[in-house]
Image (cartoon, coloured by chain):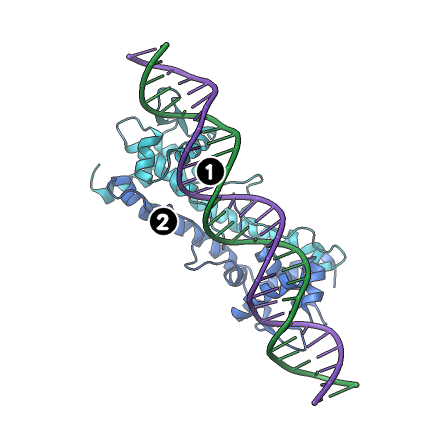
Chain colours: A cyan, B blue, C purple, D green
Amino acid sequence: MKKFSSRYSIAVHILSLVALSPTSCTSEFIAESVNTNPVIIRRIIGMLKKAGLVHVRAGTGGTNLQKGLDEITLLDVYRAVEVADNGDIFNFHDETNPKCPVGANIESVFRTKMLQAQSAMEHELAQVTLKQLVSELKEKTGSI
Amino acid sequence: MKKFSSRYSIAVHILSLVALSPTSCTSEFIAESVNTNPVIIRRIIGMLKKAGLVHVRAGTGGTNLQKGLDEITLLDVYRAVEVADNGDIFNFHDETNPKCPVGANIESVFRTKMLQAQSAMEHELAQVTLKQLVSELKEKTGSI
DNA sequence: TATCGTTGTAACTATAATGATTACATCGAG
DNA sequence: CTCGATGTAATCATTATAGTTACAACGATA
């Protein structure tokens, strides 16, 4: 089955690194920690920038948080890099047969349930701030 | 972003149709309601069969529920047609740099949060039985 | 037993998202 | 002006999905 892209985990990685790093974070530097290509990093940073989560110094280089660590939740990051047009994570088979009573009405009934499930997931993501995450990260690493 | 496949909505459609239809449901018949190819239907029915949700009469044709309507939840259907190997819906960027304190530990911290979010979603799906869904469907259609 | 409709699958195609990479224009401090 | 960094387009390989054709196997029944 298709999962969420790894963009999300990379985005969280980037933000954690930016939060913890005393030095300026270039895409090259971040790419080394993530172990991927700098362009991948720049693309994701572009999304985070568009969402107002980070500020990037073009030309001279370097990324910084634009909000406090406790003002950014995992839901914010999720929405910045994963969410499609309408935000739904479930697909529906369009164009069911309108002549069939089931085909004509199943989608709206099913969609309601799916939106509830998605809300539950997003609610959970909204509970976790980057501050918490980074704090747990610090515990794991001892200190940085 | 990539969403869940429409297999899930088709699977629910199939089960609702089988539950409501007084006549035997062939893949041809179901395909007409869903408005797709019979092979698509047979493929999904194959997954539902493997999960023990339906019984199929090969040769003579026709699909029936193998459990009571109130014994099948949306989570059961979800797992039958959508769940990958380990069941996780989130991807992680593997092979982060182990020399970087963040790269070495971010995944395990992040994964914990993601599994909580996924659990919340699945818990919501587990609350809805096909019986409820079909009952709401009946209300919508007046009667079938 | 032979027939006929149905299921179960394999094989193939088109489409789309992802992740990686190269290339290059643009930015901005020194 | 120069140099390093960002922003972004273009390309490629890989993978999942959805649809389609084709056909073997099944099983009731005439």
- Tell me residue A102's x, y (percent): 70, 59
Mark 2: few, some, or many residues within 10 Å (few <14, many ≥20)?
some
- Would you say A104 lies left or right of B84 here? right
Looking at the rendered structure, the secondary structure element under dot 1 is helix
| Mark 1, residue position | A81
In which quadrant of the rendered view does residue B58 lie? bottom right
- Would you say D27 lies left or right of B71 here? right
| Residue positioned 59% across, 66% down in the render | B45
From what the image shows, is residue B134 above or below residue A19?
Answer: below
- Tell me residue B94's x, y (percent): 35, 47
Looking at the rendered structure, the secondary structure element under dot 2 is helix
Residue A118 is tagged as none
In which quadrant of the rendered view does residue B140 lie? bottom right
Residue B111 is tagged as 2
Viewer-nearest residue: B84 or A70: B84
At label 1, the amino acid type is Val
Mark 1: few, some, or many residues within 10 Å (few <14, many ≥20)?
many
| Residue positioned 53% across, 61% down in the render | B81
The residue lying furthest to the left in this view is A142
Q: Chain of mark 1?
A: A
Q: Can you say which quadrant of the picture contains the C terminus of chain A?
A: top left
Q: CA distance from mark 2 to mark 1?
A: 17 Å
Viewer-nearest residue: A119 or A100: A100
Q: Judge whether residue B121 can be spotted in this image.
A: yes
Q: Are marks 2 and 1 in contact (CB under 8 Å)?
A: no
| Residue positioned 23% across, 42% down in the render | A141
In which quadrant of the rendered view does residue B97 lie? top left
At label 2, the amino acid type is Arg
- Would you say A73 lies left or right of B50 here? left
Q: Judge whether residue A128 can be spotted in this image.
A: no
- Tell me residue D19's x, y (percent): 66, 55
